[in-house]
Image (cartoon, helix red, strand yellow):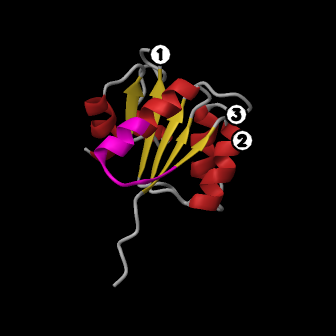
Amino acid sequence: MNEPAKTRILVIDDEESIRYAVDAGLEFLGDFDVHFAKDGIAGIEELKKLSPDLLLVDLVLPRASGMEVIDAIRNDPGINRPSRVVLMTGHSDPIPGRHYNDFGIDRILSKPFKLEQLKNALFD
């Protein structure tokens, strides 16, 4: 009998400490297929290859920003949109006065975050 496919999660963040925290948190929350990219361009390439179910992307990244990654999801027919796109940021309001979902963002996760906040951002 085939096991159900694991939820594929792509995390795009240049900070090793954040990648580690997300990986440890997801390991605690369940059995996921987690992939990482360290910059926006590598993240876009991973999006094309993996077609992840969930995306966590930092706002500030080398080579292409988180908003450029999200824009690629919206405009590149070679990228399937993940069921949830979470923008991680240390900024208080990265898109002032606008609705995040107008940009293809489902949730904002403020850094630093706690396990419960990560869980809510991805699964609520």
Q: Which of 60 and 29 is in front in this view?
A: 29
Q: What element carries label 3?
A: loop
Q: Where is residue 25 in the image (x, y as percent from the top left)?
A: 36, 37
Q: Number of marks in the image?
A: 3
- Give the residue at x 64% y 58%: 48
Q: Label 1 to label 2, Cα distance in Å? A: 22 Å
Q: Quadrant of the N terminus?
A: bottom left
Residue 87 screen position, x and y as percent: 47, 33
**Residue at image x 34%, y 34%?**
118
- What is the residue that sits farthest to the top in this orientation? 92
Which badge, 1 or 2, comes first in the chain's sequence?
A: 2
The reply to whether the C-beta atoms of the residues labelled 2 and 3 are less than 8 Å apart is yes
* Residue type highlighted by circle 2: Ile
Task: Check disc 1 and give the amino acid type.
Answer: His
Q: Are marks 1 and 2 in contact (CB under 8 Å)?
A: no
Name the residue: 40% across, 68% down. Answer: 5
Provide the residue span drawn in magenta: 24-34
Residue assigned mark 3: 64
Mark 1 Cα-neighbour bin, 10 Å: few <14, some 14–19, many ≥20: few
Give the SS element for disc 2: helix
Q: Where is residue 51 in the image (x, y as percent from the top left)?
A: 55, 60
Describe residue 78's horizontal placement relative to residue 53 as left or right. right
Q: Name the residue under label 2.
A: 41
User: Which is nearer the eye, 58 or 77?
Assistant: 58
Secondary structure under tag 1 reads: loop
Q: In this view, does 114 lie above or below 27?
A: above
Of the numbered discs in the image, which one, if any, rests on residue 32? none
Of the two numbered discs 1 and 3 on the same chain, state the one appearing first in sequence.
3
Viewer-proximal residue, 95 or 85? 85
Q: Residue 91 carries which label?
A: 1
Residues under labels 1 and 3: Cα distance?
17 Å
